[in-house]
Image (cartoon, rainbow, N blue to C red):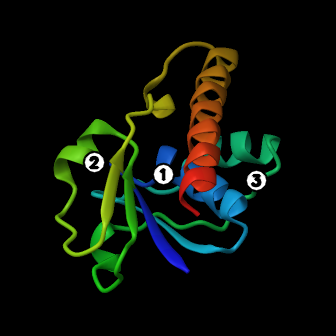
Amino acid sequence: MKNILVLCTGNSCRSQMAHGYLKQFTANKANIYSAGVEIHGLNPFAVGIMAEDGVDISKHTSNHVDEYSNIDFDFVITVCDHANESCPVFIGKTKKIHHDFSDPSKASGTAKELIEAFRNTRDEIKEFCHKFAKENI
């Protein structure tokens, strides 16, 4: 089993969405973890927008990257520039992959516009995770 860590700033939206999709797309062929370089708590909009696509992340917790210092990761995926710049060094076999997804929690506007921002980010993350799992697992 491969160990995969998805890392974001606060482990509230983007990393949580990627965690949910990677778990789905790897079909239990990998251990999936998500964390932040800070802890912001699970974003309820992220939970709702993932449920809309049939992925339940409601039981996820917001974790700090230091909680996983004893795990040897095969992949560390950073999903925002801040996490990429702040990412601790992983020695050994760890392959680091970076993709900066827009932060839907920073969006403003009407409720409809906020939901659309979360959907857009979710859909980009879903496509990325599907491709990643197909190529690496």
Q: Residue at x 53, y 58 (%)?
A: 136
Q: Are marks 3 and 2 in contact (CB under 8 Å)?
A: no
Residue 68, position as x, y percentages in the image: 35, 78
Q: Name the residue tied to disc 1.
A: 15
Q: Residue at x 59, y 66 (%)?
A: 60
- Disc 3 on helix, strand or loop? loop
- Disc 1 on helix, strand or loop? helix
Mark 2: few/some/many CA within 10 Å (<14, 14-19, 20+): many
Quarter of the figure that contains the N terminus: bottom right
Residue 59, position as x, y percentages in the image: 66, 68
Q: Amino acid at mark 3?
A: Val
Q: Name the residue tied to disc 2.
A: 83
Mark 1: few/some/many CA within 10 Å (<14, 14-19, 20+): many
Quarter of the figure that contains the C terminus: bottom right
Q: Residue at x 63, y 15 (%)?
A: 113
Q: Amino acid at mark 1?
A: Ser
What is the quadrant of residue 122 in the picture?
top right
Q: Nearer the viewer, residue 60 or 111?
A: 60
Q: Nearer the viewer, residue 115 or 111?
A: 115
Q: Earlier in the sequence, mark 2 or mark 1?
A: 1
Q: Amino acid at mark 2?
A: Ala
Measure the C-alpha gap from mark 3 to mark 2.
24 Å
Q: Are marks 2 and 1 in contact (CB under 8 Å)?
A: yes
Q: Earlier in the sequence, mark 3 or mark 1?
A: 1
Q: Name the residue tied to disc 3.
A: 55
